[in-house]
Amino acid sequence: MKQSYHLGLIGFPVGHSRSPQMMKAAFEGMGLYGSTYQSLSIQREDLEKEWKVRLWEQWDGCNVTIPHKVAVLDLLDEIDETAKEIEAVNTIVNIDGKKIGYNTDGEGYLRSLEEELSLDITKQRVFIVGAGGAARAVATVLAKAGVTSITFYNRTTSKAEQLARHVSRWTDSQIVTQVDAWEAIQTSTLLVNTTSVGMAPNSECTPIPVQWLHDGLIVSDLIYNPRKTKLLTYAEEMGCQIHNGLGMLVHQAAIALKIWTGMDAPVVTMRDALEKSLKE
Ligand code: NAP
């Protein structure tokens, strides 16, 4: 086992990311002193050149964020089964020059949900707002975990249709538009916001009208900045159980660290570091 690792994050933009602070705390907790985690801002059109020229000179692995999660699929030597199913990669390991891609977002979400709420995942009728990359990871993992059904609602309906088709091999799935969304939510048990609507600095917005919520719902928001979005604030006032994106961020990173190092990551320490960095 190595004593230290050189890891990083690629995306554009990456300046806002709290992952470096969280990873620094993880390295200390794991005794991996001297390890580094560096954010590298790479524009979409520069990915291939950076990949060939300098990305892998020193790195043992990296995380991947917007807009490269799908584009890296064509550059990898091998892709793990879950990442193939999600059709996106957020973690890459470099083993003697061979780059292997994984996706830990969906599993990170599921672990966080199960850790923070006591719920029987197989009994959930899920309503997902959004149909982008995060929705794809979350929906795939929830569908494979055996939820009863998933309904998708997205600004661009064609993307919701595509995602509903994608998960239909594992669960009942359908899409709704604005006309029938309210009705579908009334029979749902878990509502997940996977859009960026409500994220700082636009934290006054909600991805759906809050009048659509009901007190029998668990409301989950992948956003972690602010920690309590407007959607979660209203949901809590209404008596719903709420869940934010912090745990997903911690757990997807912990799973990535296990892939890179083979070691269990200190999730409590990582979460504390993340909370602290969000307050700064
Ligand atoms: P993405 O692929 O760009 O997808 C964005 C989604 O948001 C799409 O469904 C898009 O709808 C919708 N959307 C964006 N602006 C909208 C608006 N003004 N009105 C209505 N819908 C809008 O991004 P992503 O990677 O899925 O990320 C989405 C969110 O998840 C972000 O807030 C991100 O921070 C969060 N996230 C959190 C974690 C975590 O660890 N907690 C991990 C990954 C992502 P269209 O399809 O119509 O464009």
Image (cartoon, rainbow, N blue to C red):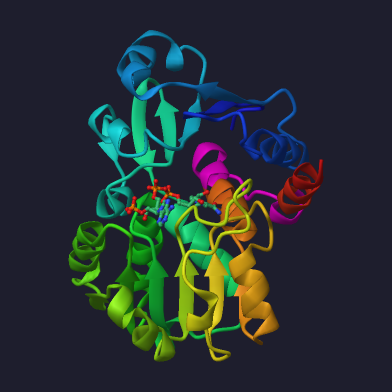
Front in this rendered view, residue 247 or 209: 209
Can residue 94 be spotted in the picture?
yes
Residue in the image at 39% along x and 83% along y: 182
Give the side of residue 85 with respect to residue 120, left or right. Answer: left
- Count of numbered badges drawn on the protein: 0
Q: Position of residue 134 (x, y in %)?
A: 41, 54
* Position in image of residue 24 (x %, y %): 72, 34
Residue at x 81%, y 46% (from the top left corner): 279
Q: Which residues are magenta?
A: 256-269
Figure quadrant of residue 171: bottom left
Is residue 268 within the magenta segment? Answer: yes
Instruction: From the viewer's side, name the closer residue of 246 and 6.
Output: 246
Q: Position of residue 206 (x, y in %)?
A: 54, 64
**In which quadrant is the C terminus drawn?**
top right
Q: Residue at x 39, y 34 (%)?
A: 67
Q: Is residue 3 magenta?
A: no
The prevailing secondary structure element of the residues shown in magenta is helix
Residue 229, placed above or below residue 78: below
Which residue shows up at 52% across the image and 15% down it?
A: 58
User: Quick one: 71 or 279, which is closer to the camera?
Assistant: 279
Quarter of the view holding residue 15: top right
Image spot of residue 31 (x, y percent): 75, 36
**Is residue 258 shown left or right of residue 45?**
right
